[in-house]
Amino acid sequence: VALELFEQMWRVKIDHNTVTFNAAISACEKSLQWSQALRLLFDISLYRLQPDEISYSAAVLACSSSSHWQQACELWDTIRARGLTLNEASRPLYSTLFMESEQHDLLQLEVELLQSLSGASGRFEAAAARVEALRLAG
């Protein structure tokens, strides 16, 4: 239903904005339409808008929910490359990426996530050091 409303906005000439794109991407996660979520994420720029941390988080969750963890990891790389600042609302993103990194033995991803979190909270520094030590040992 949400995606239908999003499409109808175009037909009745209601402008899209980042919030409407984010809502549509989130709807894709709920309906397990990961490829549609990625299309919307990249279509944002066609409207001269920039995807934000919510856009990327929703797309990561859509990919992960549909068992496309490689795409979720690629989006994490894009988040980092763009220097987007993640906040409290990004907890589901971190939880999802930690789960994927554990399931697929992606220690480097875990280190990156922990380093990202350590900037916000010192309690993760010891965990990041431990993961890095495990990576070097094995």
Image (cartoon, rainbow, N blue to C red):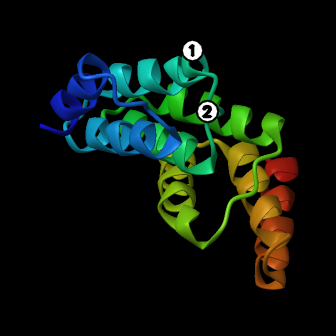
The residue wearing badge 2 is 75
Image quarter (top left, top right, bottom left or bottom right) of the N terminus: top left
- From the viewer's perspective, is the residue at label 1 or at label 2 nearer? 1
Judging depth in this view, the residue of 32 and 26 nearest the camera is 26
| Apparent side of residue 100 relative to residue 119 in the rendered image (left or right) | left
User: Where 121 sits versus 100, above or below?
Assistant: below
Residue 84: image x %, image y %? 76, 48
Inspect the image, locate mark 2, and give the three-letter code of the amino acid beneath it. Leu
- Which residue is located at x 64 percent, y 22 percent? 48
* SS for callout 1: helix
Residue 8's spot in the image, x, y percent?
Answer: 20, 25
The structure residue drawn at horizontal position 77% and vertical position 54%, both measured from the top left corner, is 111
- 102 is higher (above) or lower (below) than 127: above
Q: Position of residue 38 (x, y in %)?
A: 45, 23
Distance between mark 1 and mark 2 Cα atoms:
19 Å
Q: Which residue is mark 1?
A: 46
Q: Residue furthest bottom?
A: 123
Closest to the observer, 26 or 113: 26
- Tag 2, which secondary structure? helix
Quarter occupied by residue 6? top left
**Looking at numbered disc 1 in the image, what kind of residue is underneath it?**
Leu
Viewer-side residue, 49 vs 90: 49
**10 Å crowding of disc 1: few (<14), some (14-19), many (20+):** few
Q: Quadrant of residue 120?
A: bottom right
User: Which label number is shown at residue 30?
Assistant: none
Which of the two labelled residues, at mark 1 and mark 2, occupies the earlier sequence position?
1
Q: Is residue 67 above or below residue 115?
A: above
Direction from residue 10 to residue 117 in the image, left or right: right
Position in image of residue 89 (x %, y %): 54, 67
Which residue in the rendered view is the most extreme toward the front?
A: 13
Which residue occupies 70% across, 45% down?
109
Residue shown at 75%/56% (left/top)?
85
